[in-house]
Amino acid sequence: MFTARRLLLVEPSITLVITGEALARREAGDDIMILSAGEPDFITPKYIRDYAIEAIERGFTHYTETAGILPLRELIVKKFKEDNGLDYTPSNIIVSTGAKQSIFNVMESILDDNDEVIIPSPYWVSYPEIVHLAGGKPVIVDTEEDGFILTAEKLKKNISNRTKAIILNTPNNPTGMVYYKDTLEELADVIVENDLLCISDEIYEKVLYDGKKHYSIAALGEDIKNNTVVINGFSKSYAMTGWRIGYAAGPEFIIKNCLKLQGHSTSCPSSIGQAAAYAALKNKNEEFDNMLATFDKRRRYIMEKLDQLEGISYIRPEGAFYFFINISNFYGHKGVNDSLSFCNYLLKNGNVAVTPGKAFGMDDYIRISYAVSTAEIERAMEKFKKVLEMLVE
Ligand SMILES: Cc1ncc(COP(=O)(O)O)c(C=O)c1O
């Protein structure tokens, strides 16, 4: 009686089921390795923490402008120019309580009931749920056969007269795939031709390996820029998940609509979080190179270990900090017949927590995060190998 109908469509996070159990067992004294986290294991760099403390002491503790303080938006404008070759003004920018709220704002601003949003699968777990909450209909498009990249052809095939938007995520969570410029150009043509809005989630833009370059689809021409909202934030590149600061950049009328929503929901992002984000962009993040080098070392280590295992397959990640691994060859053994039962088996018998692919729309896979200490990864990979052997013995 007191559950809204639109919430009935929303799934609780499967990720939390596994992580919750893993944490409970760790607290009970078990030696559990948790490779399901979606956040850097590093602490926020010191120059950012120091500036935030100073902001508190100076009394920067009040509501701010709904869109976020102007000096921060000006720095975001500068970032877009320097990193992405994009020209925005502060009125094209809204700072929010994490990129998640930025995506929420945009969906709520653009969708009428049953409007469709194309979501390439595998996808970040919250996209379909955010679309549902905004009254829209997610249209999931499987990209497995195309190497986890949405092609222009597939996009075209899935457009209907109700399609309003498409979500792109590069570098991708959970696959680590990076969209190359030529693919983005082809997608941009289809998006513009069909007058869709592209929501381009670029939150992992700096977490790239093997010399790969990040391209923002919005930078590929004035037409696609007018049909794109770029989403970004501080959580991943600056190890700032708990500060909850993200942002959206796009056409002024969309940002204005987001402002209406934000003004009546959270009023503004946290002043202290904004001060920290300001410091993050104002100075050079000396610690980032180290963080990236550590991620890359772990990524190479895991690849080396995975390559020695039989029966699994994965695509070499080029960005973010995840592996998306096909483990379906192990289904049919010892009660394991989908990604959730696989993860439960791995947790029970190997003390390793990973995320079931079902959370990302692909039940033949699991996601391993390497945003955890190298020592934990090394032990977890040993256990993973043993559990695979156990499953088929
Ligand atoms: C692809 C993707 N987009 C957005 C977010 C949300 O980030 P934030 O912490 O800024 O809300 C995440 C977090 O895991 C993510 O993986």
Image (spheres, rainbow, N blue to C red):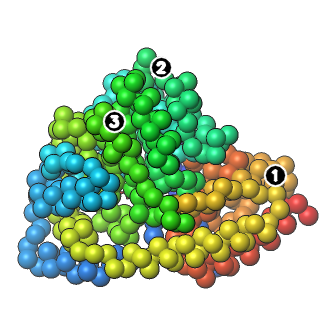
Residue in view at x 37 percent, y 63 percent: 235
Q: Is residue 391 left or right of residue 303?
A: right
Query: Which of the 4 image quarters holds residue 6?
Result: top left
Whole-angstrom CA distance, mark 1 to mark 2, is: 36 Å
Residue in view at x 88 percent, y 60 percent: 392
Callout 3 amino acid: Ile
Q: Secondary structure at mark 3?
A: helix
In the figure, 310 relative to 228: above or below? below
Badge 3 or badge 1: first in the primary sequence = 3
Between circles 3 and 1, the one closer to the viewer is 3
Q: Position of residue 243 (x, y in %)?
A: 30, 66
Q: Which residue is mark 1?
A: 329
Q: Is residue 313 left or right of residue 316?
A: right
Residue in view at x 63 percent, y 72 percent: 300
Q: Which residue is mark 2?
A: 160
Callout 1 amino acid: Asn
Q: Which residue is mark 3?
A: 224
Between circles 1 and 2, the one closer to the viewer is 2
- As rendered, which of 81 and 93 lies closer to the eye? 81
Q: Position of residue 106 (x, y in %)?
A: 30, 39
Callout 2 amino acid: Ser
Query: Which of the 4 image quarters holds residue 75?
Result: bottom left
Badge 1 or badge 2: first in the primary sequence = 2
- As rendered, which of 30 and 385 lies closer to the eye? 385
Q: Position of residue 227 (x, y in %)?
A: 31, 34
Q: Secondary structure at mark 1?
A: helix
Q: Secondary structure at mark 2?
A: loop
Query: Which of the 4 image quarters holds residue 59?
Result: bottom left
